[in-house]
């Protein structure tokens, strides 16, 4: 019996260390992100010349709307160029796109990925651009998006992540997805800059100095999670990722539970696959003083926050029911309070309404869905999994 108690104590100690470090991480970045302002560069009179890549896989109706919206951005027309990477679009859609003042690059892959699409785009881009911007097929940028991004580039930044916000909150799942996006924006982007760490790249709405973009993209061949690998490669090269809170880009949130499951399964699989690939470099990064890169690697090891919302009170309950095994319940209570405070502080006040409290009722279902997904990740990162969209627009 004593051996069993000892084994249980060791297991709960390990779990406590992992979950409490993550909880403190959430608390510190979330709270200080609210208290400490991040310096914003002044409006620049100099203008960068942009190429905007829109990655389009199927979704014919949506790309026509997104491409048209990109052309209307409030920026000198001769200073930005739109390139639509047309993968698996209908011939009539391609024909309509070619009638617009933009570049249409038709591609065919045996197995489609965003990395392959962007590689082809780079090969077919004429010289002369200062920076590249990547949009997803459903992205609609705010009119002043390019001006805000330009200010950071002109201030010397090589990489800037824009502020991706929800285009729709039409279902409980979409509301929770929108909240998750904003929590990520606060903790893993805006607040990282308080500590001069890199903002996490999302995969769309980001801008890179063109040489930096081509250098890093040609080293990426990920099926999923190309953005996470990009962040790892950039920070390992000691290139910091800035974040523009004012550069808004609207993104469609997942409104359907089944689509949510497929998307999160793909994301989790990509995350843990990259952790296996880059995790072994964490110790050497620490010795070399690459704390920005080490922070990126650490973020690969963390669980989705919805799992934390369930695991923390569960472990607190276990500590109450099994006293003497593992950390005292007081320590679990402190860690749980840090976790919940960090997440709640990061949620914008605009979300605290009747729809928000209705969406909270879905969290237990989402928790068990995500928990089960952890055991169904095999093969999810071997093949591109498409996330379907609707024609919801801002």
Image: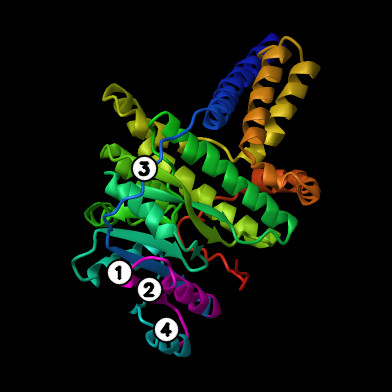
What segment carries the magenta color?
61-90
Which element carries disc 4, helix, strand or loop?
helix
Q: Are the residues flagged by discs 2 and 3 in contact, CB closer than 8 Å?
A: no
Identify the residue position indicated by label 3 in the image.
41
- Which residue occupies the foreground of this view, 2 or 272? 272
Q: Position of residue 125 (x, y in %)?
A: 24, 70
Q: Which quadrant of the structure image shows residue 324? A: top right
Identify the residue position indicated by label 2 in the image.
85
Residue at position x 53%, y 55% in the image: 266
Q: Are the residues flagged by discs 4 and 1 in contact, CB closer than 8 Å?
A: no
Q: Position of residue 15 (x, y in %)?
A: 60, 24
Identify the residue position indicated by label 1 in the image.
121
Which element carries disc 2, helix, strand or loop?
strand
Which element carries disc 3, helix, strand or loop?
loop
Residue at position x 29%, y 56% in the image: 217
Q: CA distance from mark 4 to mark 3?
A: 36 Å
Q: CA distance from mark 2 to mark 4?
A: 11 Å
Q: CA distance from mark 2 to mark 3?
A: 32 Å
Residue 87 lies in magenta, yes or no? Answer: yes
Residue 191 is labelled as none
Q: CA distance from mark 2 to mark 1?
A: 7 Å
Q: Nearer the viewer's eye, disc 2 or disc 4?
A: 4
Q: Nearer the viewer's eye, disc 1 or disc 3?
A: 3
Which element carries disc 1, helix, strand or loop?
helix
The mark that comes first in sequence, 2 or 4, is 2
Q: CA distance from mark 4 to mark 1?
A: 16 Å
Residue 227 lies in magenta, yes or no? Answer: no
Identify the residue position indicated by label 4 in the image.
97
């Amino acid at each position: 019996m004593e051996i069993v108690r000892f084994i249980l104590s060791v297991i709960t100690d390990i779990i406590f260390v992992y979950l409490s470090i993550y909880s403190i991480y959430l608390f510190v970045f979330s709270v200080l992100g609210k208290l400490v302002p991040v310096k914003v560069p002044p409006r620049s009179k100099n203008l960068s010349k942009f190429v905007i890549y829109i990655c389009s896989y199927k979704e014919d109706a949506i790309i026509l709307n997104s491409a048209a919206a990109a052309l209307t951005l409030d920026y000198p027309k001769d200073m930005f160029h739109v390139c639509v990477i047309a993968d698996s679009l209908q011939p009539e859609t391609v024909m309509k796109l070619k009638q617009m003042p933009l570049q249409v690059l038709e591609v065919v892959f045996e197995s489609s990925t965003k990395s392959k699409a962007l590689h082809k785009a780079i090969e077919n881009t004429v010289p002369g651009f200062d920076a590249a911007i990547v949009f997803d097929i459903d992205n609609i940028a705010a009119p002043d998006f390019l001006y805000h991004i330009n200010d950071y580039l002109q201030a010397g930044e090589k990489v800037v992540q824009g502020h991706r916000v929800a285009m729709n909150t039409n279902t409980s799942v979409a509301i929770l997805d929108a909240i998750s996006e904003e929590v990520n924006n606060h903790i893993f982007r805006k607040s990282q800059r308080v500590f001069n760490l890199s903002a996490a790249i999302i995969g769309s709405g980001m801008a890179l100095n063109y040489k930096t973009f081509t250098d890093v993209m040609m080293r990426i061949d990920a099926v999923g999670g190309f953005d996470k690998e990009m962040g790892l490669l950039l920070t390992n090269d000691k290139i910091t990722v800035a974040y523009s809170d004012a550069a808004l880009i609207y993104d469609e949130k997942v409104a359907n539970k089944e689509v949510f499951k497929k998307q999160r399964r793909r994301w989790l699989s990509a995350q843990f696959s990259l952790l296996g690939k880059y995790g072994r470099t964490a110790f050497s990064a620490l010795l070399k003083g690459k704390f920005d890169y080490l922070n990126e690697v650490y973020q690969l090891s963390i669980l989705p926050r919805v799992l934390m919302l369930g695991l923390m009170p569960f472990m607190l309950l276990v500590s109450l029911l099994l006293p003497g095994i593992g950390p005292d319940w007081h320590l679990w209570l402190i860690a749980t309070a840090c976790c919940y405070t960090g997440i709640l502080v990061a949620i914008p006040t605009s979300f605290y309404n009747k729809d928000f409290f209705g969406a909270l009722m879905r969290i237990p279902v989402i928790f068990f869905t995500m928990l089960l997904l952890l055991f169904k990740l095999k093969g999810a990162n071997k093949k591109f999994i498409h996330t379907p969209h609707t024609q919801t627009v801002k």
